[in-house]
Every structure is written in structure tokens, then in C-alpha cells.
Image: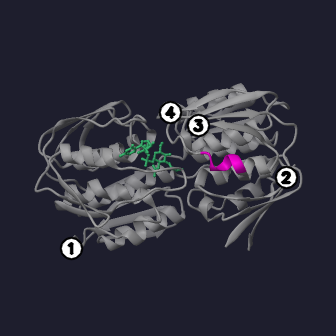
Amino acid sequence: MDAFRIEGGHRLKGTVRVNGSKNAALPLMAAALLTDQPVTLHDVPNLSDIRNLCKLLEELGCTCERDGGTLRLHTTDISNSRASYEIVSTMRASICVLGPLLAARGRAEVSMPGGCAIGERPVDLHLRGLRALGAEIDLEQGYIVARSKRMHGTKLFLGGQFGSTVLGTANVICAAALAEGQTVIEQAACEPEVVDLCNLLLAMGAKISGQGSPRVIIEGVPSLSGAEHRVLPDRIEAATYMAAAGITNGDVTIENCPTDVMTAITDRLHHVGLNLETIDGTDPMRQTVNITSDRRLAPVAVTTQPYPGFPTDVQAQLMALLTLADGNSIITEKVFPERFLHVAELSRMGANLYRQGPTVMVIGVKQLHAAPVMASDLRASAGLVLAGLAARGVTQINRVYHLDRGYEHMETRLQALGAEIERISV
Ligand code: EPZ
């Protein structure tokens, strides 16, 4: 099993390019199930989650050929529509094949994804949306078994107790794209990754409006064609490297940065004391920006919310940064209230954290100290890497396979910025 060893105290300096977004790429790949023509995606990150979904799509009759950052997908065999527990249990985002399979084939069997390190991951909203479109859905031996001759458009509400659902919205939009008539989704997710999916579907011939707003309208069409699409840059990865620059008082230039959809993030980081300068703002979704930070970081209050609020996927990284702020910060997690596995690990490194339910008070300390720590979920792992970059001594982060799910060659990219980090086998 791999681990990272990080010698803290080195300022990051240099340039890093943001990859295509994992959370955009996964539903984009699943959309290839909606057509019997080829779908080509550019800027697809080379991550374990992407490779796992390729494996699942191959099982479902959709070939996946990678050529550098390009992925060519082609659904040629529709005989198997069962997404097995073996793959779905390793990556719950596999649920994103449910809507496309059902829409294209009239049947889908997808293993219930189960929970994960950040909490229970229900799919009741996905099922509510698909049932509203006319699907018959049963749960049989841990599998979602969905059937429908042809779904029919309707007006449906997709909000849950934590607000909108990203992959639930993706599933319902894909299903509605081939349904009979008009579908109106109220409280659709507004995430940029959902907009990116809609941009691909539009290129495939779908009729969609309102994407990026809570009300999305889809006019069903009889079939969809193939298309070519460049994956949206990863705003979560960009935020992670911004925080890395901040926690090391570094000077980092970030290329291919989707700054236009990062306002909640850059607002909070600005208040903490990071200085963001736009070097090339020609394309607001693929900017070049420079990040430096004030010597002393300031405390802030932040609450994670669905887009355009502060993203839950940056909560752990911001917490790591705030452990060294000059004062007390408050972080409230409104999307995944249990998403705090990094709290105990950061405390082992000398962070001063007090959790009460979905809220953590972060009392700034002067210095973090190296310690052996355990990665748990993708973004918690990223938070531990940031803490290791600043801690005095050599931090060892175990189980970095969690990190490999969402960050491509993180250690080599941080090395290029001057970090003393290496991957070791333990
Ligand atoms: C997507 O997960 C992302 N994953 C997550 O990123 C991200 O944290 C999350 O959206 C929120 O932004 C991908 O896009 C692959 P949700 P998703 O459905 O769609 C509840 C990462 O680190 N809910 O928007 O599965 C749910 O429990 C990953 O890259 C229901 O109650 O998340 C949560 O509290 C982690 N019923 C809230 O809604 C449902 O049917 C938001 O979940 C579905 C969700």
C-alpha cells in the first residue's frame, strides 16, 4: 500500500496546470450510453475513479479507448444492463449510469452504492426523479432494478433535506433527454459539472434550457448522436493548489483555472489572506492566475452549501489552512454533516479543533507538527497533504489510494512546485 512522506516547511513556487474535472468527467462518460455513436472526451484526468468507470462501461457494452487525455467511448453492445456490486461498491459515483441505461435501453440493474467515509449516501432522490418520469423501480437483493418502455416528461421536484443532488440531477436530465415530451426539474443542482454534462448532451442533439439554474427544462427527443467535448477544468483541484500555496506562503501560478465558477472559494480564500492575481483572463473558465499569501492568515466563517455556495469538496482543505490562522474560525458542513474524518488526523498534527455536530471551531495555532496520519476519503486526504506541507518535520500519510481517486500524480506536481514529498510503499 502506498503512502506519502512529506517534509514540511518548503514554500511552493512555480506553475501547475489544473486537469479536467473528475466530477464532470464521470457523468460525461456515462452519457455515452445514450447513443450508439462514438463520444469523444478531451482533458479526461487519468484517475482510478475514471479507470473504474471505464471498466464498468466496458461491462455495459461501451468501449473506452484512452489516447493521452482523450477518451473515445462507443456503445456497441446493449445486451448487458447490470452494473455489478463489485465495481459500484468501490465507486458510488457509478450510480451515474442508471439514468442513461434506463433511457437508452428501457432497463437497468445497478447495485445500491452503499455509504462511504463521508457518510450515508442515499439515492432516494435519484429514484424519485426516475419514477416521476414513469420508470418502475424495485430493490432486489441490493440492486436497483429499473424498467420503462419509454419515459414521459413531467414536472418534478428533486430537492432533498440537504438541498439539490448533483448526480441525481445528472441521472434525471439524461433520462428526460430521451423521454416523450417536456420535463421540468425544480431544485436541480446548479453545479458547473451539471452544466458541462448539459453542454455535451446539447452537442448530442438534446434540447435543454435553464442548466446552471434550479429550474432545468428538457424537451425529449427520439435519439441522440455522438459528439466531441472538452471536460471542464477541475475547480476542486484548483482550490486545493490555491490552499497549498496559501499554507506554505508560496507563490504559485495556476493554469487552466475555472475561476469563473470559483467565486465562493476565492471569496473565502481572499478573506483568509490569499492574493489572487489574474495573469490571463481571456477564457473565464480556463484562466491563468497567480496565488500568493500574506504572512499571517486570518480566520473566517464558512458554511458548505450546494453551488454556488462554498463547496463541501473544499471543506477539508480550507480547514487545514485555517489551523494556522491568527484567530478562531468556524466551519459548518451543511451538505455532508459527517464529513469530518480529517478532524482527528489534523488534531494529531497539533491542530486545535472542537467539533459540535456539523460545526467545527478551528482555533489557530502557530505551528503544526509532523505525525503519521491516515487518509480516509479523497478530500480529507488532500487536507492532510496540505497540513504536511506546512508541518514541522516529516509527515507520513498512509492509504493515499484515496488521493489517487481524484488527484493525478499529486506528488510529482507538488515536487515540481518545490515540495519535499515522495510516494513510498509501506
Ligand atoms: C457529487 O456527489 C460529487 N461527486 C461529490 O464529490 C460532492 O461532494 C457532492 O456532489 C456534493 O457537491 C461526483 O460528482 C462524482 P449529492 P453526489 O447527491 O452527487 C444527499 C468528491 O470528493 N442526497 O449532491 O453523490 C446526500 O447524502 C465527491 O469528489 C440524498 O439525500 O452528491 C448529500 O447529503 C465526494 N438523497 C447531499 O444530498 C439522494 O438521493 C448532496 O449529495 C442523493 C443525495
Whether residue 141 sits left or right of residue 358 in the image: it is: left
Q: Quadrant of residue 100?
A: bottom left
Tell me the kind of residue under disc 3: Gly
Instruction: Say which of 304 and 100 sits in front.
Output: 304
In this rendering, the answer to whether 67 lies above or below 240 is: below
| Magenta-span inclusion, residue 315 | no
Dot 4: what SS? loop
Question: Which residue sits at x=80%, y=41%?
Answer: 250
Of the two numbered discs 2 and 4 in the rendering, the one whose residue sits closer to the viewer: 4
Q: Is residue 172 left or right of residue 282?
A: left
Q: Nearer the viewer, mark 1 or mark 3?
A: 3
Secondary structure of residue under mark 1: loop
Q: CA distance from mark 2 to mark 3?
A: 31 Å
Residue placed under numbered mark 4 in the picture: 305
Q: Residue furthest front?
A: 356
Residue tagged 2 = 8
> Alpha-carbon neighbours of circle 3 within 10 Å: few (<14), some, or many (≥20)?
few
Comes first in the chain, label 2 or label 1: 2
Question: Gap in Å between the C-alphas at discs 1 and 3?
Answer: 47 Å
User: Residue 102: x percent and y percent?
Assistant: 22, 57
Contact between marks 1 and 3 (CB within 8 A): the answer is no
> Is any part of residue 116 visible from this angle?
yes
Residue indicated by mark 3: 357
Between marks 4 and 3 in the image, the one whose residue lies nearer the viewer: 3
Q: Which residues are drawn in magenta?
A: 340-344
Dot 2 or dot 4, earlier in sequence: 2
Q: Earlier in the sequence, mark 1 or mark 3?
A: 1
Q: Give the number of the disc on residue 79.
A: 1
Residue 115 screen position, x and y as percent = 46, 56
Residue 406, compared with residue 308, is above or below; it is below
